[in-house]
Image (cartoon, rainbow, N blue to C red):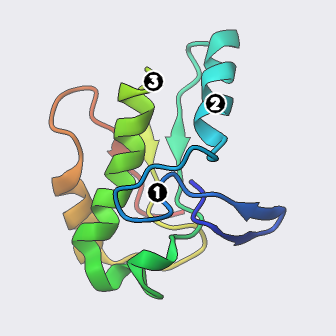
């Protein structure tokens, strides 16, 4: 999951660069869609690499908004692209916050299939 930040291979755009404004330049959904056309049984897992600036320098400072940001990605995948997400990571190469994990679990969609939340990376 891109967060409008520099990664190893360049900048990876976010699905929500501004709060509640969904990006049209994020390529991840198209890529997943194409992969599932080839092999629909591949489980889709997502891992936030970074977070957009509107969530602050430390996304755990506002756990509810950060959790909603991640759940928005899941919703876009399901509602606009038609795929379910099997698992969700917490944050690439960072320590996790137990209270954030609880907020994220409460924010996950309640109807099956409900993604697993992967705590440790």
Q: How dense is the environment of label 2, judged by Cα within 10 Å: few (below 14), some, or many (20 and up)?
A: few
Tell me where residue 114 sits by quadrant: top left
Residue assigned mark 2: 30
Residue assigned mark 3: 83
Mark toward the start of the polypeptide (2 vs 3) = 2
Q: What percent of the width, then of the height, locates residue 55? A: 40, 77
Residue assigned mark 1: 16
Question: Is residue 50 toward the left or the right of residue 78 in the image?
Answer: right
Q: How dense is the environment of label 1, judged by Cα within 10 Å: few (below 14), some, or many (20 and up)?
A: many
Q: How dense is the environment of label 3, judged by Cα within 10 Å: few (below 14), some, or many (20 and up)?
A: some
Disc 3, disc 1: CB below 8 Å?
no
Mark toward the start of the polypeptide (2 vs 1) = 1
Is residue 19 in view from this perspective?
Answer: yes
In terms of depth relative to the viewer, which is nearer, 39 or 76? 76
Residue at 27% in and 74% down: 63
Residue at 24% in and 47% down: 108
In terms of depth relative to the viewer, which is nearer, 50 or 55? 55
Q: Secondary structure at mark 3?
A: loop
In terms of depth relative to the viewer, which is nearer, 21 or 42? 21
79 versus 100 height, above or below: above
Distance from disc 3 to disc 1, alpha carbons, whole Å, reads 18 Å
Quarter in which the C terminus is drawn: bottom right
Distance from disc 2 to disc 3, alpha carbons, whole Å, reads 11 Å
43 versus 25 height, above or below: above
Q: What percent of the width, then of the height, locates residue 79? A: 35, 27
Q: Which mark, by number, is residue 51?
A: none
Q: Secondary structure at mark 1?
A: loop
């Amino acid at each position: 999951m891109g967060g409008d930040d520099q990664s190893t291979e360049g900048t990876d755009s976010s699905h929500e660069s501004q709060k509640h404004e969904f990006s049209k330049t994020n390529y991840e959904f198209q890529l997943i869609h194409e992969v599932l056309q080839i092999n629909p049984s591949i489980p889709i897992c997502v891992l936030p690499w970074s977070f957009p600036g509107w969530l602050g320098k430390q996304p755990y400072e506002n756990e509810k908004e950060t959790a909603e940001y991640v759940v928005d990605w899941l919703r876009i995948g399901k509602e606009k692209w038609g795929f379910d997400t099997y698992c969700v990571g917490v944050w690439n190469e960072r320590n996790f916050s137990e209270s954030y994990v609880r907020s994220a679990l409460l924010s996950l969609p309640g109807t099956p299939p409900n993604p697993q939340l992967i705590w440790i990376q």
